[in-house]
Amino acid sequence: MTLLKPILGLEDTFGERARALRQLQFKLFEIYNQAGFSEVIPPLLERPQSLSSGAGAFLADQTLVFSDPSDAGQLAVRPDITPQIARIAATRMHHADELKLYYSGQVMLARPDERTGSRQQWQTGVEYLGGQRDVGDVEVIHLAGLSMQAAGFDSAVLQLGHMGLIEALIVDCDVPIEKWVATLARRSPEDMKQLLLQSKLNQVSSEALMVLASGNADVAWLNNTAHHINDDFEVAANELLHLSSTLEARLCGDIKVHIDAAVLPRFLYHTGVVFTGFAMGTSHALLHGGRYDKMMASHGRDMPATGFSFDLLSWLSEKS
């Protein structure tokens, strides 16, 4: 009987929950189709190097790798679908200068998620590849807001950040970006203070990182600080401020836009604008997204790329 027990972190979906999942999935598909996006269905398995290309160690720790008994070499169960979209765009769909794609399928984590204890997700997302960067960012973030509304979440808020801000602040530091991001994720000024003691950053950058860790890096702070760090910080700040004003003119209803320079991506392969989605009554991010141009370049196709994704199973749990 032990062999029949469910695997820890995995579960079956059936009955009313399965019906609710499909209903929401198809409702979202209708929104994406009307926006001119097309569905793509990647396989569950990939070669490990395809998943890690452009993502590096950020996905490696969550990728389950095994030897194929049919002599195909090492294979991996996908923990994230975005690298698959990058591969498809660089190979099977290389003829198209602009790609507007969406997907929905299961992914599996090698280790349980720290918050939920689950190893499975029903990842659903939208990707915009090619075209103008600002157009792609606005279109994708707009669809992120519409997705939360369609799922029934009230008072949706999209928090905008930019990885270029963090990178500009730590440019002269030997401490890896992973450590800075992990510290910022805790939103603990005390933890940030300890890290700054190790890093020996200049005073201006140190003070800015303390503001980020304190959760006070809003639009007013960004406007006041943009010109006082370095050129890279100013470029990223202006990009973020311009995007925010453009989105405020585009979005309608209950969807709000809020700048928080300490917003972090789910995976560290994002390199530019990043965003998260929240709603009333939720204590954690409902979706994550951002720009991942460097991943496309690592797949052999240098083109703009941005998107967002979320766990459909988690959304059902939030609404139940």
Image (cartoon, rainbow, N blue to C red):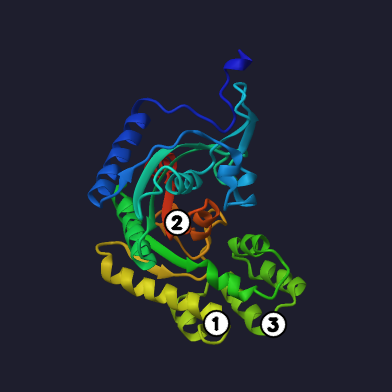
Task: Please tell me which of labels 2 and 3 falls first in the chain.
Answer: 3
Kindly identify which residue carries mark 2.
Answer: 289
Between circles 1 and 3, the one closer to the viewer is 1
Percent across and percent down for residue 135 are 33, 65
Amino acid carrying mark 1 in the image: Asp
Amino acid carrying mark 2 in the image: Gly
Kindly identify which residue carries mark 1.
Answer: 231
Foreground pick, 220 / 42: 42
Q: CA distance from mark 1 to mark 3?
A: 15 Å
| Residue lying at 65% horizontally and 74% vertically, measured from the top left | 171
In-image side of 296 versus 180 (left or right): left
Q: Which mark is residue 242?
A: none
In-image side of 270 versus 128 (left or right): right
Amino acid carrying mark 3 in the image: Asn
Percent across and percent down for residue 193 are 70, 72
Give the quadrant of residue 307.
bottom left
Q: CA distance from mark 2 to mark 1?
A: 25 Å
Q: Crowdedness of circle 1 by 10 Å Cα count: few (<14), some, many (20+)?
A: few
Kindly identify which residue carries mark 3.
Answer: 202
Q: Is residue 214 visible?
A: no
Q: Are marks 2 and 1 in contact (CB under 8 Å)?
A: no
Which residue occupies the extreme top position in the image?
A: 1
Foreground pick, 308 / 210: 308
